[in-house]
């Protein structure tokens, strides 16, 4: 199974917080930096309908423009134990 994909922007404090949280929880993910990458930005917008980061694609379940407070309940719903 492929890893969840986390779309981020350089210098985004929410992105940095989410990365730190996922790393502390030892949750594996793939990072795609959309800053300066039109193709990656277009992919994120097509997926989420917006251009704000972070955006997480958890095997088809999408959480967009979020912080750790929104991430925790999202993960409780989508992450297998």
Image (cartoon, helix red, strand yellow):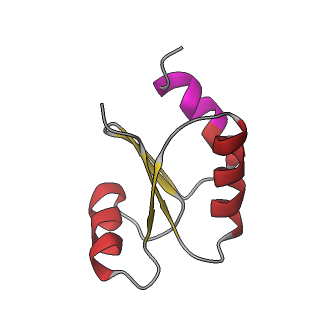
Q: Is residue 44 magenta?
A: no
Which residue in the rendered view is the most extreme toward the top? 81
Q: Residue at x 42, y 85 (%)?
A: 36
Left or right: 16 in relation to 39: right
Q: Nearer the viewer, residue 46 or 35?
A: 35
**Quarter of the image where the C terminus is located:** top right
Q: Is residue 75 magenta?
A: yes
Left or right: 10 in relation to 30: right
Quadrant in the rendering for residue 45 = bottom left
Instruction: Give the vertical position of 39 relative to 14 (above or below).
Output: below
x, y percent for residue 7: 46, 61
x, y percent for residue 35: 47, 80
Q: Nearer the viewer, residue 37 or 64?
A: 37
x, y percent for residue 72: 65, 34
Magenta-colored segment: predominant secondary structure: helix
Q: Residue at x 61, y 41 (%)?
A: 71
Q: Give the magenta-colored segment's residue range.
A: 72-78
């Amino acid at each position: 199974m492929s890893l969840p994909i986390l779309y981020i922007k350089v210098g985004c404090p929410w992105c940095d917080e989410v990365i730190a949280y996922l790393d502390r929880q030892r949750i594996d993910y793939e990072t795609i930096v959309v800053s300066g990458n039109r193709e990656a930005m277009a992919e994120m917008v097509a997926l989420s309908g917006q251009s704000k980061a972070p955006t997480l694609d958890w095997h088809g379940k999408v959480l967009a423009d979020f912080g750790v407070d929104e991430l925790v309940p999202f993960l409780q719903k989508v992450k297998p134990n």
